[in-house]
Each structure stands twice: as structure tokens, then as C-alpha cells.
Amino acid sequence: MDNNDVIFIKDSVVKSLLNWTDSVDAMESALIAISNTQPSESVPFSSQTPRTFTFAGDKGVLLTMPGYASNYALKSVTGTDTKHSTLSCKLVTSFSGNSQLNPAISTILGTILLFDPDTGKLKAIVDGTEITAWRTAAVSVVATKYLGCDLSLDKGHEGKELAIVGCGTQGRIHALALLNYFPNVFTRVKLWNRTQSRADNLKKELKDLFPNVDITTVDTSVSCVKDADCIVTATNASQPLFELKDLKENVHINAIGAGTNHHSELSMDIYQSSRVYIESNIGLQTELKGIEQYVSGEIGEIVIGKKFLYKMDTDKNVTVFQSMGNAIEDGVMANLMYQKFLKQ
């Protein structure tokens, strides 16, 4: 391969390179870099701008998400002593009419461009579809690891219940991520989806993969979460799916979906009574307008010890990770694929 060649890593190759240990390690490194925006020669740091939206008439929209991350580790691939820098831009198109084409194609398509961080030269084009799904779930695993105090791997917790509210692409990948990364912690899983067949299909898939886990489908979102220790919401709901009174104590919520906005799945009293953490303060005032005053900080600040979890002065002690997606995460995951591709 010539040094001038631009590598294209297509989706099928990305799928063959992905695993949860590598992905979660990479996203923890990304979150650390996100929470340090001061340039340094010794610690991870990052730079990024809010995503931009370019509308293609009434047909669709192009989103652009550039970012730079430096001095971060991909410890499961290249070890902790090797430090990486990534200059990247994720491009996402959303065209609702694609589903009506013959043959139909995905309505949302993503591609990540990787540049040489020293020269700016394009070095790789990475299909972003599978990366987007995996990095979103991997970040939720990191959030659950640090915010879900009753779910820590090193505390011998087991017999916990996981609730998946919304069984589409993100609900499915989150179930796989959490059950793989927290073996023996979740012994029960409840599934709910507005269309019952999706919940049934996911139940069958999970039963085949995790035969020792009790997996059931339920009729309502409230019944799905009422006994859960960890909840994933991954829907397009425009109205809250449940309220604070529906939750047990010490529950952790990964709020992933985006209906009317990023925070339409949970009731306002949950945000008001919980410790809410996000990936990045970039876009906080715009994308989380209405709940920004309830955000306690970034997950990376917890990981590196800039901030510490504290017990809320309520009887529920709920933690919420509000997912928004992030250019740094996409760039670091694309670089993970690039490094594994080169080794292969």
C-alpha cells in the first residue's frame, strides 16, 4: 500500500473489526479527551465545534461534525504507551424519502473522514453506519460503569434487571453491549416496543445469545422500567415514556432517543431530581435547551476525577446519562478501525 493511498474501510470490514472491549476502552479515552480542551503535550485533550446543518431543499439534510483529539490511548490495540491524535470529520445525511426507493436504502447514512493530524492530508474514509451504533452503545457502557454505582463490575453485583425501552437499532445494540460488558450482572431483561413484533424479535435473538438470562416482553413502557436497575430509552417518543414515581431507587438511565428533541423521552421531574451527565458541553445550550440547568457535568470529568458523584437529596438517587453523540467519539472510533485495519 502506497503512502499516498487513501484507505476506504467499508461497513462489512468495520463489522469484522469491532468488539466491545476495544470499543468501550476507546470511548473512555474519547470522553477523557472531551473533558479537557486545554492543549497539552502530556494529557488527552480535544477541540470541536457544534454540528452544522445544511438543508438540501425539502429532501434532506447534511450534518457535518469536525473534531480533533490528541494524546489519547487505544490501550486494547496499541497499548497505553502509544498516544494517538485524530483529525476527523463525520458527515451524516438524513433523507426520509430513501425508504420509498426501489430498492430502499437507509434514510440516515454516515461517513467519517480521517486526516493526517500533522499534515491535514486525507488518509482514510471509514463507513460510519456501524460505528455510529457501536460508539453510542459503548459510551453508554462507560456511563453505566461510572454512574451506575450499584452496577460496578468490581463490587460483585449480580441479579440486576435491565430495561430496554425501544427495540430498534439502538435498543438492540445497547442490550448486546450491556449484556456482553457486564456478564452475570444482569440476570433479567425486560423489553418494550411500540410495535410488539420488534420486541419479540429482539427477545428471540437475546435468548439465543444469553440463554442464562431471563428475557421477557411487556405491554407498557411503565411496566418495563418499574423494577429496573438500569434503563435504556431508545425511541422517537415526543412525550415522556415514564415519570419519577415509576422508578425504583438507585436506578441508572441511559437516555438515547431523539424524538421532538434529545430529552423528550423522560419526564421533567426525572431531570429535576437526578444527577444528569452528558458527553460534552458543546451544544448544551441549544440541543438540551430546557434541561440545561439540571446537567451536573460531563462523564469524562467523573472518569478523570475532576468531579465526583454525590448522593441526591431525594429518596430515589437516580443517575441519567443524556446521549447526544459527539464528533470526538466518531473520530476516535474511526481511528480504532484504521489502526486495527493496518494491523490486520
Image (tube, grey):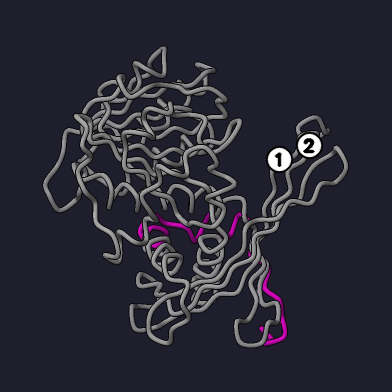
Residue where numbered disc 2 is placed: 98
Q: How many marks?
A: 2
Q: Distance of mark 2 from mark 1, alpha carbons?
A: 6 Å
> What numbered label is drawn on residue 15?
none
Residue where numbered disc 1 is placed: 106
Crowding near the residue tagged with mark 2, few <14, some 14–19, many ≥20 C-alpha atoms within 10 Å: some
Name the outermost residue toward the right: 57
In terms of secondary structure, where does tag 2 sit?
A: helix
Above/below status of 75 relative to 27: below
Relative horizontal placement of residue 340, taking residue 88 as reference (left or right): left
Identify which residue is drawn at 27% across, 28% down: 228
Quadrant location of the N terminus in the rendered image: bottom right
Find out whether the residues at labels 2 and 1 contact each other: C-beta distance under 8 Å.
yes
Relative horizontal placement of residue 103, taking residue 298 as reference (left or right): right
Q: Position of residue 118 (x, y in %)?
A: 61, 87
- The three-letter code of the residue at mark 2 reads Asn
